[in-house]
Image (spheres, helix red, strand yellow):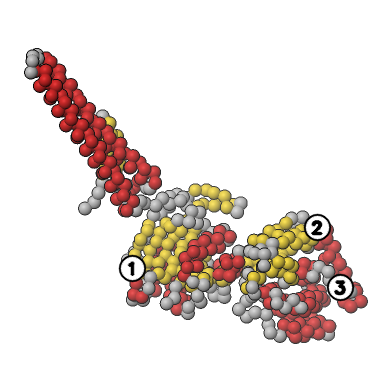
Amino acid sequence: MWKVAVFVVAATIASAHAEGIVLETFVGQRPDEVTRLLAPFHEELAKRDFATGDAAGRKYEAAISRPALTKEGLPADFEAAVERGHKAWVAGRFDEAMSILGPLVDGAHANPGAFAQNQPLREKLLKALVALALSQQRKGDVGSAKSTLGEVLRSFPDTQLSRAQYGPDAFQLYEQVRRTNAEKGRGSITVKAPSDNAVVFINERYENMGTLTKGDLVPGEYRVFVQVAKQPSRAHRVTVRAKEDATVAINMPFDVALRTGPGWTGFVFANLSEREKNEFKYALAFAREISAKALIIVGVTGSGSNRALTGALIDLASGKEIRRASVALDPAPTADRVRTLAKFLGGDEPTEGIKVQVREDPPAPRTSEQHGQPTETPEEPTPAASPKTWMKWTGIAAIGVGLIGGGLAIKFALDSKSYGDEIRERCMTACSGAEVMALQDKQSTANRNTIISGIVGGVAVVSGVTFLLLWRHSARSAPMAIAPTRNGAMAVFTFSF
């Protein structure tokens, strides 16, 4: 049996252009059936400007991190290919050299984890970078040549280009790039490693173990990853600025679970327990890192004939559910029914074919600051009280009213007996009618006060319980309420039958 969840980040549930992203989560490997099952779901959300497939992953990779190793990995003939490209540059075949060396450099930067166990490969990478930069220079692309030499300075800061070996033009260009970067100043990177035995790499170079700060760095973009027991983290993009310290904290479990393509974006968990513990937290973190505003989670729940595709709209600020609905998977749902689920989660009214469990749309959005820009975020939804909660407190109120009523009834009977005994005792000798009436009025007053005390006590108990529940939960679902009247207050109980 396989399980899947999809996350959608939306601006608001009522917006037709949600500018959202779609994430998928799995326990184990991603099954082939998922592509077919979720195709209508993705198609519907794509119409509403949601990024589906690996589009969200590309956005994340451009801003935050990418895998330390791609599915293809570093080419098996990397070293031999570098030599071919270098020979093409020496022979003056600059176009051929660039066509060979350009993809090799890109492949190396996309697979920094390949250098963790084979550090001598860095020397081949340096050879490829120098030959590529000088080929770009000879073809008149000075801008690309400077950019490539800047990468040489960041990754191999001790490199010298010999005038005798590479020629005066190459020497002068390299010195120009070096002086320009020196004038800007240097910066540093602080890597917060997940443990003391995490091996830290910066631009494919082994640095140390555990948390560290690397200074005297040429400004620019760096690739940072760690490795724990041969398991690499993701390669994080870190921009170093002159006279500043850039900090990156590596969350190893998050990095290991996250996938950003090809073809899809989401999380893979080792087991169901890990998914239940982390998928919500990880999805929220992912969404916030790319400045999303809301989150929808949808996944396969249940087992056997009770399986369903269940989705919930989550408020990104509070992490609370706003909408939840499901589509039965036995029999297999039609494409239109899956689209209906996507439409509802995207903000449309519910229609036939889906089962709505929660629908509590947020109030008008409020303005807040996020990443330095004003954004709209939904107010935190207030959950309704559960039936069990109301039954518990209603029972407590009933017991309290019963105890007050029983106690006052006993007092009522004792007072009546006391005043009756007094009347009989006095009238056994002699008593006037006025005295009897006075004693009876005294008894009536006491009885009336007893009744009023009972009513006040009962109302106090009901009021206390009601206000407690109103304070904890939404007043819309309260079965009790207190309403003011002309001469006091009235306790109101509501129920259905």
Q: Position of residue 463 (x, y in %)?
A: 31, 39
Q: Is residue 81 above or below residue 319?
A: below
Instruction: Say which element carries label 1.
Output: loop
Q: Earlier in the sequence, mark 1 or mark 2?
A: 2
Q: Which mark is residue 185?
A: 2
Q: Position of residue 420 (x, y in %)?
A: 12, 25
Q: Position of residue 441 (x, y in %)?
A: 16, 21
Instruction: Say which element carries label 2.
Output: loop
Residue at screen point 50% across, 54% down = 317
Position of the N terminus by quadrant = bottom left
Q: Which mark is residue 161?
A: 3
Q: Earlier in the sequence, mark 3 or mark 1?
A: 3
The front one of 368 and 28 is 28
- Tell whether label 2 touches label 3 (CB within 8 Å): no
Residue at screen point 26% across, 44% down = 398
The front one of 405 and 362 is 405
Distance, label 3 to label 1, CA atoms, is 69 Å
The front one of 285 and 294 is 285
Foreground tag (3 vs 1): 3
| Label 2 Cα neighbours within 10 Å, binned few <14 / some 14-19 / many ≥20 | some
Disc count in the image? 3
Instruction: Using the rendered image of the protein, determine whether residue 20 is visible from the camera's viewpoint.
Output: no
Distance, label 1 to label 2, CA atoms, is 63 Å
| Label 3 Cα neighbours within 10 Å, binned few <14 / some 14-19 / many ≥20 | some
Residue at screen point 35% across, 45% down = 469
Which residue is labeled 1 in the image?
Answer: 353
The front one of 406 and 485 is 406
Badge 2 amino acid: Gly
Q: Earlier in the sequence, mark 3 or mark 2?
A: 3
Instruction: Say which element carries label 3.
Output: loop
